[in-house]
Amino acid sequence: MLFSKVGLLVSLAAAAVAAPLQERALIPLKPSVDPFYQPPAGFESTAPGTILKNRTIVPALLGLLPSNLVAYQLLYRTTSINGTAIATVTTVFKPLVANATLDKFVSFHTAEDSSFVDCAPSYNYQLLAQQTNAIVGFEAFILNGYVSQGYIVSSPDYESFDAAFGPGRLAGRGVLDSMRAVNNFASTLKLASNSNAIVGIGYSGGAIATAWAAALQNNYAPELKVKGWSSGGTPANITGTALYIDNTTFSGFLPAAVVGLSTYNAYGTSLRPVIDSILTPKGREALNYAATHCSTDDLAKYPNFSLLSTDIQTLGKDIYYQPAIAAVLKDSTLGLVASEVPIAPVNLYHAINDEIIPYSNASTLYKNWCSQGGSIRFTSFTSGGHATTEIDNIGRVQQFVKDAFAGNVSSGCTAITLEK
């Protein structure tokens, strides 16, 4: 058994060394210490979507199962919530098959769900990378399904180098600028042009990025040829979601979200002074933990955590009424601004009994976007929960992607209810 394991590692190492254009150590560096993630001097003067660096990587499922494809990572310029230039990374997977489609690509937004940069998808996708983020590892299999169908797939670190979990406007811009970056990389990918058809998809935490990118596209990146968006288990109202999971099995997401919303790239200028002034020692300990751990650790460490408790912060139940906090939460709610309505059709779906993201998040968003002129197909499921709804809909989302690229998604709004 020992020799077989050694043989496996030797084989994996040989595959990594033999990779074309590979310019890094055999064992991938974590983002917190990898210089690739740091933008060059003067990048602030470049346009959003500009590629600042690129490299090839050896992709692998769960860090140990090499995939039959070529993959690149692009460090690209994007924009923080306050308008300053920042940089982040997208990983681009290209299938090594004769039927690869070269006039389109899928933008896949995995659920990072963490506020620690070493949880980033771009790190977890690499051969021999320590699997820091179990959610990313699971969803990599879903992503691989699109590659196996011949699609080029881009998966951005939309939370940015700050690893800001929660602020949708930041995530949405990160997604849109990753699409621009892929178009700017067209010659290397052998794409047909630098203006390719795109469909964006994401579930749960990935739906924050997906739905916000859909909402912001018309004002931020109208030139992109997005043919459709698929957003499932969408946290459209962060306040409602926070209250829903407070003091439950899933309350470990709360410290990470507070950290994410208060990063410099997000709302740090307005939020951090308030949070620093109201945190108790126990609350500070929770936020410090979330800032250095990934989602599975957060969930294991803080079940039945209550953000409303005066053990955590001094305002107690009034925390959501504090002016600076209330303003940020309102700015982070989808569907409130009429000009922020998707200009491409949206496949929105949600389980009525979702135990993590309340169903009202999706149903209210559907009503708002429809009243604002969007084309939304909303599917409600009477059975199943949060995780099972993602799994049960893998095939439906794949079909939506195919239909959207073909222009076969009808306009207007439709709501249906299914069992699963």
Image: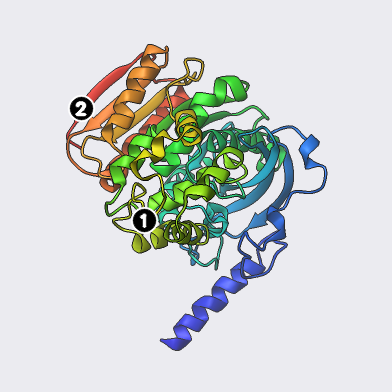
The residue depicted at 43 percent of the width and 52 percent of the height is 255
Q: Does 386 appear above or below 126?
A: above
- Disc 2 on helix, strand or loop? strand
Which of 404 and 77 lies nearest the eye of the viewer?
77
Quick check: 411 left or right of 101? left
Q: Position of residue 109 (x, y in %)?
A: 48, 42
Q: Is residue 155 visible?
A: no
Q: Is residue 298 visible?
A: yes
- Location of mark 2 (residue): 417
Locate the C terminus by quadrant. top left
- Location of mark 1 (residue): 311
Quick check: 10 left or right of 314? right
Q: Amino acid at mark 2?
A: Thr
The residue depicted at 50 percent of the width and 64 percent of the height is 63
Q: Position of residue 337 (x, y in %)?
A: 47, 19
The residue depicted at 34 percent of the width and 22 percent of the height is 366
Q: Does 356 appear above or below 347?
A: below
Q: Amino acid at mark 1?
A: Asp
Numbered tag placed on residue 286 in the rendering: none
Q: Quadrant of residue 397?
A: top left
Mark 2 burial class by Cα count in 10 Å: few <14, some 14-19, many 20+: some
Mark 1 burial class by Cα count in 10 Å: few <14, some 14-19, many 20+: some
Q: In 3D space, how far apart are the residues under numbered discs 2 and 1 (Cα atoms)?
A: 42 Å
Q: Position of residue 137 (x, y in %)?
A: 44, 57
Q: Residue furthest bottom?
A: 2
Q: Position of residue 139 (x, y in %)?
A: 41, 51
Q: Nearer the viewer, mark 2 or mark 1?
A: 1
The residue depicted at 26 percent of the width and 46 percent of the height is 388
